[in-house]
Amino acid sequence: MNAKDSEKVFLENVQGLLDQGAENLESQTERRLEEIRAGALIAVDERHPRFFFPRRWVLAGSFAMATLAAAALLFFLYPSTATLPTGDLEDLEIITSRERLDIYQNLDFYRWLGSQDNHVRPNGKGV
Amino acid sequence: MESTLDSKEILNRFLAEVERRAFQMAKFATRNRDEALDLVQEAMLQFVRRYSIRPREEWSVLFYRVLRSRITDWYRRTFVRRKILTWLGRPGEEDSEDPLQRMPDTGNPNPSDHILRQEKRGALEKAIRALPLRQQQAFLLRAWEGMDLKQTAFIMKCSEGSVKTHYSRAVHTLRGLLEGIRS
């Protein structure tokens, strides 16, 4: 029998003796262990608040709040000084208006029509 | 409701599986039945509250990690208490003999074989109690609980190299002390 086999046999014997010791506890100890187990099972219900509000949620919420606070701080410390181009705003008005766009395609015609209106009264007669 | 009952029953079975071994481990460390029962109680409560929501396959390692932690805390407290008592001139408590060793087992058909095994068991338990705490834990977790190196290192909160060292020293010491158990 080599050293490895010898150690294996030794450990098997040790396991057997330890198991025997654990199986042959005093009845008083066994009863006490059962009571302890029953008490631990009652404590299962105490863990539920942790289940609904786990620590990682608190961590995630804290991280989100910290990011928002940092963004707000940067915004107030370094406000943007660039002015918006007015032309762009006019374009925006055109795009968002409910008017049909084909009116701008005949802009020359309407300009001419407007100049004619300056000389013509509503009754069709000139100034 | 049914799933809660099922999970409680699964937990009950798991605790019933580990409670005797846990008690024996705690008793090897404390050499005192009541202290060992208190440690098992603390470990079970802490395990149930903190880790019973984890997957079933992780329970064994987590339970023994909690138990080891409780035992180590107890060991530190006792060490300090003994130091103070020694300093005050009052000797610590003597190791008491396990009454179980003296109890007759009427169910065994071969009394001489039983006595031999009981003697061996007594010698083994005495030798394990005499081991340093870290060696004791490494040996019991590896040789008795069948934990692998990684699991034992996780439970003992140390490196795998340390586990190897503690375990091999424990085996070497025990084999030297327990020649009779080999046969």
Image: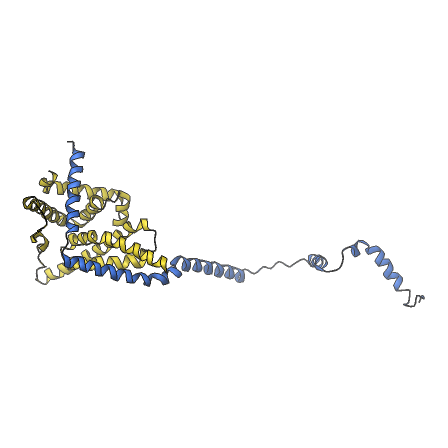
For this orientation, the residue located farthest to the left is: B112
Q: Which residue reaches farthest top?
A: A1
Q: Colour of chain B?
A: yellow
User: Residue A67: x, y in percent?
Assistant: 47, 58
Q: Where does residue B154 sit, x and y in percent of width and height?
A: 28, 48
**Taking A125 as reference, is B49 left or right?**
left
Residue A53 visible (yes or no): no
In front of the other: B128 or B59: B59
How has the structure been colored for display?
by chain
Q: Quadrant of the C terminus of chain A?
A: bottom right
Q: Residue B62: give x, y in percent of width and height.
A: 29, 52
Q: Quadrant of the N terminus of chain A?
A: top left
Q: Residue at x 53, y 62 (%)?
A: A76
Horizontal side of B29 relative to A107 (left or right) equals left
Q: Left or right: where does residue A40 sit relative to residue A74?
A: left
Viewer-closest of A124 and B88:
A124
The residue at 33%/58% (across/down) is: B5
Q: Position of residue A17 (x, y in %)?
A: 14, 45
* Furthest residue toward right: A125
Q: Nearer the viewer, residue B163 or A111?
A: B163
Which chain is the one coloured blue? A
Left or right: residue B29 versus residue A121 is left
Q: Quadrant of residue A52?
A: bottom left
Look at the image and tell me whether residue B48 can be seen. yes
